[in-house]
Image: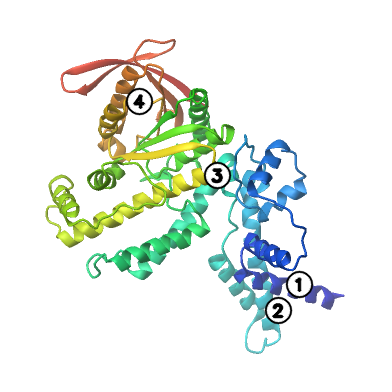
């Protein structure tokens, strides 16, 4: 009996270990389906992602067994109000189950294989080695993207960082970021784009991110520290967006100090999941966009992002303009022209690809929505753009503007100035700020108004020297 159990364990372990290099379950099923259709083994039925999504939306009740084995499902295309039901999204620990099985299988396999030659190697050490190798090299199971964004955004953020680390290692290995020894040629550009495309297959949003820590420890507004803070903030912004989307005209959504853009993505996904045919013009403001946004204005006279069109640096005149601007405005006075060109191109590629990832995902997931995305290096740049378009913010959101860099850049002052200007142009506009409450170590929701409201606090604000404005702040503690 003992031999039978050991043999069963050995076979199980060997199969699990072999599965390490196997293709992803979904790819495996796709290939089987193609072959079966070619051999006429399956009925000729049309089973599109859209029909599956509609079925899920109309029949949200699924058996726990079926939901548990949603390892095989493709990402949904959402055309009707959608409610996420994936158990792997609700309980992210299930995504680690696959890795645990494979790692255990590898350890068992090496243990039993080495037992046949134990005169040369200790089976226990071989098993331990297998566990170490499995822990180090076996990939965790990819979480369901859309459902994770809706139910447990932290798991999507964590997995995105995992893939981003792999991408960084690949860039380092290829030497693409070697400024001193390698010029940024057309070949380097192609290699970079190819590398990004490769990792997008693993996780289409791997360039997006969000604040997770401060210099002395975890940020109290991070999802890992207290998920309720971000969730409450998102509910407030989504509620405002849905209210504004009841109108026929597009909603002007402004994400201030957007950083890695992940927070804005979660907000937009949660809103569009409830109103998949919504019309939203997305405007993201961050200091990090300065070089990229200015380059787009010089070359394209617009900061709007296009899914399949990249910024074109081929014009020598435009490049000379950008180099001179970098030397006079961006502190690059002592840099060589070749280094400025390379830094600028790499910065623009990174920011553009990040924006394209966000826009492409939203348009693919919500094909009936009407979406546009534009970026700005400052609130002032956005306000200048509104003068041309005569469209003003309907919803302004900001989260975590009290880190060291934001305080140095006076992000809270620029945010207050932006809200003031937009409220003057559009009195019905909403602004929602997720702020820290350092005395209690908690978070709060702040809203700015130009007129006194119930429970509001009067604050004096000086956007310009010798020009004082009275604002009224309403705050809600997140307990």
Crowd around label 1: few <14 · some 14–19 · many ≥20 (10 Å): some
Residue matched to label 2: 112
User: Which residue is nearer to you in this view: 101 or 250?
Assistant: 250
- Residue 411 image position (x, y, % from top left): 30, 33
* Residue drawn at the location 18% of the way across and 47% of the way down: 330
Instruction: Please tell me which of labels 4 and 3 falls first in the chain.
Output: 3
Closer mark to the observer between disc 2 and disc 4: 4
Alpha carbon distance from label 2 to label 1 = 9 Å
Closer mark to the observer between disc 4 and disc 1: 4
Considering only vertical position in the picture, is 170 above or below 141?
A: below
Helix, strand or loop for disc 2: helix
- Residue 52 image position (x, y, % from top left): 68, 46
Instruction: Please tell me which of labels 2 and 4 falls first in the chain.
Output: 2
Horizontal arrangement in the rendering, residue 168 relative to residue 34 (left or right) = left
Instruction: Please tell me which of labels 2 and 1 falls first in the chain.
Output: 1
| Quadrant of residue 393 within the rendered picture | top left
Query: Is the C-beta separation of discs 2 and 1 under 8 Å?
Result: yes
Considering only vertical position in the picture, is 326 above or below 184?
A: above
Instruction: Please tell me which of labels 4 and 1 falls first in the chain.
Output: 1
Q: Which mark is residue 9?
A: 1
Crowd around label 4: few <14 · some 14–19 · many ≥20 (10 Å): many
User: Which residue is nearer to you in this view: 381 or 115?
Assistant: 381
Residue matched to label 3: 365
């Amino acid at each position: 009996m003992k031999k039978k159990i050991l043999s069963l364990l050995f076979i199980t372990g060997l199969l699990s270990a072999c599965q390490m290099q196997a293709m992803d379950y979904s790819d495996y099923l796709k290939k089987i389906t193609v072959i079966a259709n070619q051999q006429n083994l399956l009925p000729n039925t049309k089973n599109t992602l859209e029909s599956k999504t509609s079925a899920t939306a109309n029949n949200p009740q699924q058996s726990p067994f079926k939901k548990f084995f949603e390892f095989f499902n493709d990402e949904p295309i959402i055309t009707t109000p959608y409610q996420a039901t994936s158990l792997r999204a609700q309980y992210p620990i299930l995504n680690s189950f696959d890795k645990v099985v494979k790692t255990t299988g590898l350890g068992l396999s090496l243990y039993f294989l080495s037992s046949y030659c134990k005169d040369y190697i200790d089976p226990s050490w071989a098993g331990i080695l297998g566990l170490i190798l499995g822990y180090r090299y076996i990939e965790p199971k990819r979480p369901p993207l859309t459902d994770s964004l809706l139910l447990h955004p932290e798991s999507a953020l964590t997995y995105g960082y995992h893939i981003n680390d792999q991408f960084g290692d690949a860039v380092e290995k290829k030497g693409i970021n070697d400024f001193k020894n390698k010029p940024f040629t057309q070949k380097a550009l192609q290699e970079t784009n190819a590398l990004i495309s490769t990792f997008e297959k693993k996780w289409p949003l791997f360039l997006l991110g969000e604040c997770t820590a401060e210099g002395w420890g975890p940020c109290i507004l991070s999802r890992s520290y207290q998920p309720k803070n971000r969730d409450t903030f998102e509910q407030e912004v989504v509620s405002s967006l849905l209210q504004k989307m009841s109108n026929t005209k597009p909603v002007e959504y402004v994400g201030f100090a957007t950083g890695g853009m992940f927070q804005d993505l979660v907000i937009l996904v949660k809103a569009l999941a409830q109103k998949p045919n919504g019309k939203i013009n997305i405007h993201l403001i961050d200091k990090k966009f300065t070089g990229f946004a200015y380059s787009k204005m010089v070359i394209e006279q617009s900061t709007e992002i296009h899914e399949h069109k990249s910024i074109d640096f081929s014009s020598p005149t435009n490049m000379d303009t950008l180099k001179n601007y970098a030397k006079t405005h961006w502190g690059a006075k002592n840099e060589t022209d070749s280094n400025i060109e390379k830094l600028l191109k790499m910065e623009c590629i990174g920011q553009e690809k990040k924006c394209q990832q966000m826009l492409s995902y939203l348009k693919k997931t919500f094909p009936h929505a009407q979406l546009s995305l534009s970026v700005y290096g400052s609130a002032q740049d956005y306000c200048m753009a509104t003068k041309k378009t005569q469209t003003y913010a309907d919803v302004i959101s900001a989260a975590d503007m009290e880190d060291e860099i934001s305080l140095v850049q006076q992000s809270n002052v620029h945010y207050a100035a932006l809200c003031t200007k937009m409220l003057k142009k559009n009195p019905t506009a909403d602004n929602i700020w997720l702020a820290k409450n350092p005395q209690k170590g908690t978070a709060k929701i702040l809203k700015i108004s130009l007129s006194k409201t119930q429970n509001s606090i009067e604050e004096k604000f000086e956007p310009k020297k010798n020009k004082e404005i009275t604002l009224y702040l309403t705050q809600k503690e997140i307990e």
